[in-house]
């Protein structure tokens, strides 16, 4: 499984980096971030691309999700 | 339409309605809200520039910060963070303001101007969109100002909110630090700085817009950027709502005036209306948000965004002290040179800040 760290990045880099990873053929991706907005945007994008979103950690300062088909 | 999209449209309709209300209550034409103009007025009130016609501590902005802070705090989203190429962000804020003051408005005011029938704003919007595409060119090549770090304590995030509250205290107290010199605080006695809605109405409208903009993540550059990059339309729907509300209310109130000439606080130099908002779009994409979004992010504890806002205030002071800002008569030669230099410099920043591995 590929991993991606988008903590602290400005919009739209979390989504853009997710898109790049998927474009490279990633089928399962673990993404870690720390802003609510990036969590919403990455989830929305993943769902729009036909991926399932599985939030495995959501603490006040950080979230981790696994997206796969 | 799903709930999220309905929320975006309703948010837009409310903000558009408040913008028209503020003009009806005394704000300058098509300027119910304008982040660039209001930051410029506020910089003037503090004496950072001495353009007598544009000096006033705009309560709308204070309300915006209070509303966005409250909404972020209530949602557990207030978080102190910073340290992502702060000086570069300051500089981008300066240029974003110079672009806005050559055009005469931020992206939000561009939509309000269009809703009032000002066709110069359509030219501006075209420039804004092309500027966003130019910014995306750099994003796609790996542009990244670096990750912001969470602060060990939340203290730093309160500085921006605290400074805003201090402005409110100064405004309410009406203190003049140098009465013989006329201020600061300086308050315009001629238009457009003298045109203002009553303080409490302006402040209240600002609070409502701040709450809504924080919850909706409102950002016009983000709207176009997300549409071009990932075909996401939520933010554009909100701005569609703003435009619709402003258009309908202006038509109803007889304030709709279609044309290029004779528009309030606007000029008809098409090239520099286009390029002004081009520079704003370019800067906004590199910064991760338009002027409104920077105000909201700052209120959520994002100290880089707060520095960008300070950069915009410095940009306003530079624009008026060095005669870069346009007026109703048109753009200035200095402003035109600064604008083109800005596009070049911001493009160099866009190229220089590419990630090596991207």
Image (spheres, rainbow, N blue to C red):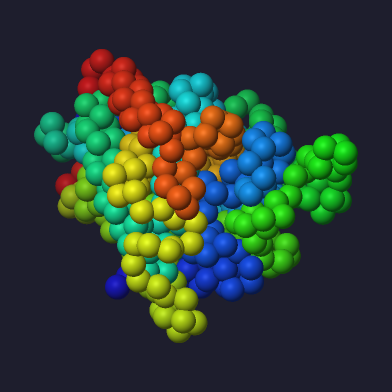
Camera-nearest residue between B10 and B285: B285
Quarter of the image where one finds residue B275: top left
Q: Residue at x 52, y 34 (%)?
A: B323
Question: Measured from the top left, where is residue A12 in percent x and y?
Answer: 34, 39
Relative side of B204 to B253, left or right: right
Q: Residue at x 62, y 48 (%)?
A: B54
Residue B181 at least partly seen: yes
Which residue is farthest left?
A25
Question: Measured from the top left, where is residue B299 in percent x and y?
Answer: 60, 44
**B334 versus B262 height, above or below:** above
Task: Report the quarter where the N terminus of chain B lies.
Answer: bottom left
Question: Measured from the top left, where is residue B175 in percent x and y?
Answer: 86, 45
Camera-nearest residue between B211 and B248: B248
Q: Residue at x 63, y 26 (%)?
A: B152
Question: Measured from the top left, where is residue B349 in percent x and y?
Answer: 35, 22
**B12 versus B96 height, above or below:** below
**A44 versus B156 height, above or below:** below
Relative side of B155 to B208, left or right: right
**B256 versus A28 height, above or below:** below
Task: Report the quarter where the C terminus of chain B lies.
Answer: top left
Quarter of the image where one finds residue B52: top right
Relative side of B271 to B301, left or right: left
């Amino acid at each position: 499984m590929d991993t991606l760290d988008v903590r602290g990045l400005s919009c739209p880099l979390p989504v853009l980096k997710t898109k790049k990873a998927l474009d490279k053929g990633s089928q399962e991706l673990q993404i870690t971030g720390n802003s609510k907005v990036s969590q919403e945007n990455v989830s929305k994008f993943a769902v729009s691309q036909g991926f399932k979103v599985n939030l495995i950690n959501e603490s006040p300062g950080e979230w981790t999700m696994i997206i796969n088909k | 339409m799903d709930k999220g999209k309905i929320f975006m449209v309703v948010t837009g309709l409310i903000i558009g309605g408040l913008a028209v209300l503020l003009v009806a209550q005394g704000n300058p034409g098509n300027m119910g809200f304008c982040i660039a103009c209001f930051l410029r007025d506020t910089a003037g009130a503090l004496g950072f520039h001495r353009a007598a016609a544009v000096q006033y501590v705009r309560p709308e902005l204070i309300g915006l910060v209070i509303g966005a802070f409250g909404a972020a705090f209530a949602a557990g989203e207030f978080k102190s963070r910073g340290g992502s190429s702060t000086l570069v962000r300051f500089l981008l804020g300066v240029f974003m303001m110079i672009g806005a003051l050559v055009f005469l408005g931020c992206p939000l005011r561009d939509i309000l101007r269009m809703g009032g029938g000002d066709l110069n704003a359509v030219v501006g919007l075209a420039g804004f969109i092309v500027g966003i595409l130019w910014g995306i060119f750099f994003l796609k090549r790996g542009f990244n100002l670096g990750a912001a770090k969470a602060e060990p304590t939340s203290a730093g995030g309160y500085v921006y909110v605290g400074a805003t509250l201090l402005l409110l205290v100064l405004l309410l107290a009406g203190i003049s630090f140098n009465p013989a010199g006329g201020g600061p605080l300086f308050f315009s006695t001629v238009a457009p700085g003298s045109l203002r809605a009553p303080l409490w109405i302006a402040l209240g409208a600002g609070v409502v817009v701040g709450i809504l903009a924080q919850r909706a993540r409102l950002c016009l550059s983000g709207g176009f950027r997300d549409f071009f990059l990932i075909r996401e339309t939520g933010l554009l729907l909100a701005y569609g709502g703003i435009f619709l509300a402003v258009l309908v209310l202006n038509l109803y109130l007889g304030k709709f005036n279609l044309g290029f000439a004779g528009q309030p606080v606007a000029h008809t130099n098409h090239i520099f209306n286009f390029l002004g908002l081009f520079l704003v779009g370019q800067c906004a994409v590199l910064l991760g948000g338009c002027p409104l979004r920077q105000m909201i992010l700052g209120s959520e504890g994002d100290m880089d965004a707060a520095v960008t806002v300070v950069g915009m205030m410095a940009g306003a002071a530079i624009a008026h002290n060095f005669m870069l800002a346009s007026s109703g008569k048109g753009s200035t030669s200095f402003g035109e040179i600064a604008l083109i230099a800005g596009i070049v410099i911001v493009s160099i920043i866009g190229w220089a800040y590419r990630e090596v591995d991207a």
